[in-house]
Amino acid sequence: MSGPIERVRQRARLLASIRAFFAARGVLEVTTPVLAAGVGTDPAIEPFVTRYQGPGGERTCYLQTSPEFHMKRLLAAGSGDIYQIMPVFRQGEVGRRHNPEFQLLEWYRLGFDHHRLMEEVAELVDQALERTLPVEKCTYRELFQEHFGWDPLTAEPAQMEASARRHGLQVAGSMTKDQWLDLLMATVVEPTLGHGRLCFVHGYPASQAALARLDPQDPRLACRFELYLEGVELANGFHELADADEQRARFEADNAARRAAGQEELPLDERFLQALASGLPDCAGVALGLDRLLMLRLGASDLAQVLSFAFFDA
């Protein structure tokens, strides 16, 4: 791979291409806090915690795992279509495709649903990679039925465990249904996706909706998609949930899952919930990992090859 200065130049070219993409579409670039009092409650994502001490007192703060909450507050305030390029932070994530600090591109489009947003994501990735790739769309259920022979909406954990063992996966302790699904998706299904093409997976189980609304035609499913290229997860998008009461219930369920797993509960972001209650416009949003996109653009096999300084060298 190229040296560190060439990596800097390549990243600058990628960022310029992305900014040109959104400028041509009239999407506003915004900046929101990296350090804040609120953070997401997802049990699968652990934030970095710190303390503010100074004028105004003391308070616990979090390095943001995503700019989502602040960007939706801007949407509720009338910003219109927006995007942001921002460093985000997640505990315990180091590996070939993970770094505790990484660069995220997130954007929101008013009047879009998740299917229309998939089309724009494909356009952006094609521009960023400087080539046009074929697009494939498949449902989450189709993938599990193809790989394992059972429906992820109705299968029992015992079936999932049996499939995991057939693929050489050994897990100590009990796991929930969604934990089994996540394990099988990450280790068996994901590596097969998006080879020579952009693969959009959609129709995730409602239990994995996060901040997406549920499908009005089948509430067992979430209006959510993920994008894969060369077996790498690049993006996660939603037709955004605008119901503050439902979102509060999901946060509380997250904290219940955290308690059950022995994790620390996290405070609910009341300002974000107030913004939802005030009226979030109908929109779809997506988060895309720029380090991974640059890795694919340059043909690298490890995130460390595209970072100016890898985590243990920083």
Image: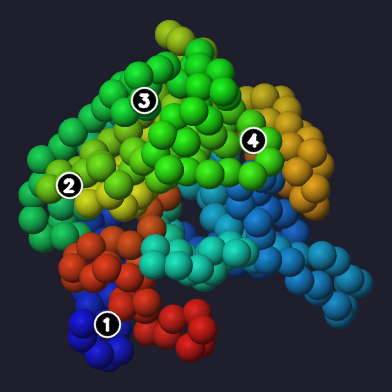
Query: Disc 3 to disc 2, how far (Cα)?
Result: 20 Å
Dot label at residue 195? 2
- What element does badge 3 sit on? helix
- Res 247 → quadrant: top right
Mark in front: 3 vs 2: 3
**In the image, what residue type sits under mark 3?**
Phe
**In the image, what residue type sits under mark 1?**
Arg
Residue placed at 42% from the left, 85% from the top?
Answer: 309
Query: Disc 3 to disc 1, how far (Cα)?
Result: 40 Å
Percent across and percent down for residue 158 are 57, 23
Indicate which disc, 1 or 2, sits on the residue closer to the N terminus.
Answer: 1
In the drawing, does residue 222 fall left or right of residue 117? Answer: right
Query: Disc 4 to disc 1, how far (Cα)?
Result: 41 Å
Indicate which disc, 4 or 1, sits on the residue closer to the N terminus.
Answer: 1
- Res 141 → quadrant: top left
**In the image, what residue type sits under mark 2?**
His
Mark in front: 2 vs 4: 4
Disc 4 marks which residue? 175
Query: Disc 4 to disc 3, how far (Cα)?
Result: 18 Å
Mark in front: 3 vs 1: 3
User: In which quadrant of the rendered image does the N terminus lie?
Assistant: bottom left
Indicate which disc, 3 or 2, sits on the residue closer to the N terminus.
Answer: 3
